[in-house]
Image: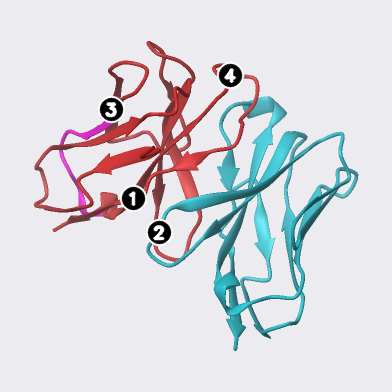
Chain colours: A cyan, B red
Amino acid sequence: SQQGEEDPQALSIQEGENATMNCSYKTSINNLQWYRQNSGRGLVHLILIRSNEREKHSGRLRVTLDTSKKSSSLLITASRAADTASYFCATDARTNAGKSTFGDGTTLTVKP
Amino acid sequence: NAGVTQTPKFQVLKTGQSMTLQCAQDMNHNSMYWYRQDPGMGLRLIYYSASEGTTDKGEVPNGYNVSRLNKREFSLRLESAAPSQTSVYFCASSVPGLASYTGELFFGEGSRLTVL
């Protein structure tokens, strides 16, 4: 069973707009990670946020974590056509530590 | 620095055939993983190895076996392939050698397997 679930499944925006995608999970976690996957490629790590952290930034990316709601969000600001990809959250559950589980992803399309 | 290398990139099998997917990493990572990704879905963990000499089942281990040959290499074997095993397989590695948490995962480019 999937621990993390992304929402929305698909998102289409114009270049320059912000993109927000969400991840919900079911059990307590050690950390949560976000990954990007370009079509036909492997996954690339974007950012890791630990359970005792509430927000992290990396360039145009901002990740928040609300452990009380068991949810996280990924914000991509000033999106570019090159941001077109699928985005996945991965959770490292405390009861299943060391075995990150992935959601089904959000497919982001950024139109030039 | 090649990172994580998987071979082969593409493979077509007939039902009942066997094959081994190879994975090697050159980052001196302790942990290695095999995931499968079905169309439009996320990754599901097949097996993982927290350190050389140890392996553990993931979410979908049935029909697969693994070998952690040494610190660099982690192979995945399909003994008798079935159409349900048609998927894209990803190998990944990460630094931690502990079963207590997952660090940043570094992925290979995937092996696309079709079972007829």
**Residue lying at the far front of the rendered structure:** B1
Mark 4 secondary-structure assignment: loop
Q: Magenta segment range?
A: B75-83
Q: Residue at x 59, y 37 (%)?
A: B104
In this image, A15 relative to B95: left or right? right
Which residue lies under the disc numbered 2?
A: A41
The amino acid marked with disc number 4 is: Ala
Q: Quadrant of residue A76?
A: bottom right
Q: Element type at marker 2?
A: loop
Q: Are marks 3 and 1 on the same chain?
A: yes
Q: Which mark is on residue A61?
A: none
Give the residue displayed 12% in from the left and 38% down from the top.
Answer: B18
CB-based contact (under 8 Å), mark 3 and mark 4:
no
Indicate the position of residue B115 as horizontal and vertical percent values.
17, 54
Instruction: Give amino acid for label 3.
Output: Asn
- At label 1, which amino acid type do we have? Gly
Write down the residue under mark 3. B65
CA–CA distance between discs 4 and 2?
A: 27 Å
Question: Along the polypeptide, which appears first: circle 3 or circle 1?
Answer: 3
Distance of label 3 from label 4 (alpha carbons):
20 Å
Q: Which mark is residue B99?
A: 4
Q: Quadrant of the N terminus of chain A?
A: top right
Answer whether residue B76 is magenta in the image.
yes
Q: Answer yes or no: do the residues labelled 1 and 2 have beta carbons within 8 Å?
A: yes
Residue B6 image offset from top left, x and y in percent: 29, 41
Mark 2 vs mark 3, foreground winner is 2
Type of amino acid at the residue the image marks with label 2: Arg
Q: How far apart, in angstroms, are the residues tagged by discs 1 and 2?
A: 7 Å
